[in-house]
Amino acid sequence: MKKYLLPLVLVGGGIAGAAAQADNLRILLPSEFSTMDPMEILSGDQTMVMYHIYCRLYTFDDSMSPVPELVASEEVSEDGLSWTLHLRSGAKFHDNTPVTADAVRYMIERMREKGGSQQALFKAISEIDVVDDTTVVLKTNKPFPALRNSLAHPNAGLLSPAADTAQGDAFGVKPVSCGPYEFVEWQRGSHIEVKKFDDFYRDAGDVEGVVFQFVPDVATRQFMMMRGEADVALRLGPAEAQQVESVDGVHTIDLLGRNMFYGLNYAKAPTDDIRVRQAINYAVDKETIIDRVLQGAGQPSRSVLEAMLWGSIPVGQFEYDPEKAKKLLDEAAPESRKLVLLSPDNRYLLDSQVSQAVAGYLEAAGFDVELKVMGDWAGYLDAVKTLNFNLYMLGWGGSTGDPDQVLQSLFKSSRAGKAWNYSSYSNTDMDAMIDDAGTTLDDDERSAKYAEIQNQLFADVPWLFMYRGANYTAVRDQVSEIHTLEGPSFHYVFKLPNE
């Protein structure tokens, strides 16, 4: 199997094959979602579609570093508490209304008022001053070095205030933003279509339109690529990727992406006991699961921060020790040894198969496991939100390239029982540590603080630590351009700014 190091850009000719007409692409996604409102981005597939529709103040280059998108220039005060952003003139939303500083304020205030899943991105912003149509000043109470990263996050997509006001709750199914592609249609259970926005402020490349087709079955995605019915197919397994590569004109992108883990519910017995959480980690043979279930497509997870993130360190690993697991479980002596394990199906690579293996290991260690597998991603998230589980499977990619967003989202007490801290982890000392690191300007000092945080979280055992999962994307050789963001593990098919 061909392997590519990231960052990666593939360059070739026009679009070929039966998949689409010239200059149009068909991209196969494993899962559908319920909305395209930037307030509620809940999956990588959703992010990939929305990345083509929405524009942001900053975007990411291929190394996950934030670079200006709609920001023409910036001025940061010496104390780091005031950011003056000058917007590019002439940028338009897809309804032909202008992109203004008021739209920036509208986006941030909307996220705060509606309580979106990533409202922590803007927590540091204390004041928003609109100076004129193209100038906005963002003020913070404390320094926030990750502000550019936060404003490049997909949840920070700008939206037309006029369209949002007119559409109300329907905005999420007919989004109006200012990205390189505008929304055409969404046929539920089938596809989403977008077309190039003719008034986009810069050259975005040659692709005139994209159809994102929802194909949950991995074998079907494989055969559609092999028959020339698609141009890109996401999240193939190792076996499917190998088969696809046997076809002339098709190759695969192989990358290690998000952290895969099972969140352990602090608010439900018996996982409210640290000895039980430790026992769960010792009971599961992660190496064997990687080798036999994933067919080698992964590496053991060694921290709550993905290895590609700045500040990540390899903290450690719970080695497979079933006898130690049994001893810890006996010491804890919970009233019930029943565990409810929630798992998606076809959301992540071989996810339900991994969950079946995990359940088997836990049963062997003395637990009574009720495994609930759900094929519908939106339905799965609804089940997770009830908090009626002991373990739930999730993959997390560093969508800002900075540790602050990961830690704020997954471990702050204010998010306990809510997205994305469904483990209900709550620790006021950890809250203070996360906030302190997030407002530290010196990189060396900040990195040392994140090392301390990672060590403490590993000791607290909020997860069943599993693996950093591999992703395989099949791509036709003649696709003109495809960029890959390693952290959130998705692709986009338009040019970067200044490319």
Image (cartoon, rainbow, N blue to C red):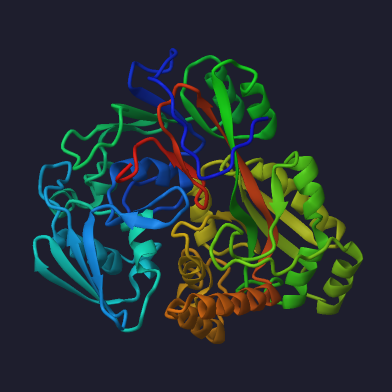
In the picture, measured across the screen, residue 418 lies left or right of residue 468, that is left
Q: Nearer the viewer, residue 81 or 269?
A: 81
Return the residue found at the far right: 323
Nearer to the camera, 67 or 15: 67
Q: Residue at x 57, y 57 (%)?
A: 308
Relative to 380, is 454 above or below?
Answer: below
Question: Along the horizontal axis of the image, is 171 left or right of 314?
Answer: left
Q: Name the spot of residue 352 as percent of width and height, x first.
A: 67, 44
Q: Quadrant of residue 366?
A: bottom right
Residue lying at 31% horizontally and 83% vertically, measured from the top left: 79
- The picture places residue 324, in percent across and down from the top left corner, at 88, 69
The answer to whether residue 335 shows anywhere in this view is no
At x 55%, y 82%, the residue is 430
The quadrant in which the N terminus is found is top right
Q: How many marks?
A: 0
Q: Position of residue 218 (x, y in %)?
A: 59, 30
Q: Is residue 241 visible?
A: yes
Q: Is residue 494 above or below residue 102?
A: above
Q: Is residue 402 above or below residue 426?
A: above
Q: Looking at the picture, does residue 135 appear above or below residue 207?
A: below
Residue, far left: 132
Q: Can you say which quadrant of the picture contains the C terminus?
A: top left
The answer to whether residue 337 is left or right of residue 179 is right
> Which of the 4 quarters of the picture holds residue 180?
top left
Q: Position of residue 450 (x, y in %)?
A: 56, 75
Would residue 231 appear left or right of 196 to someone viewing this image? right
Residue at (64%, 58%) from the top-left corner?
A: 261
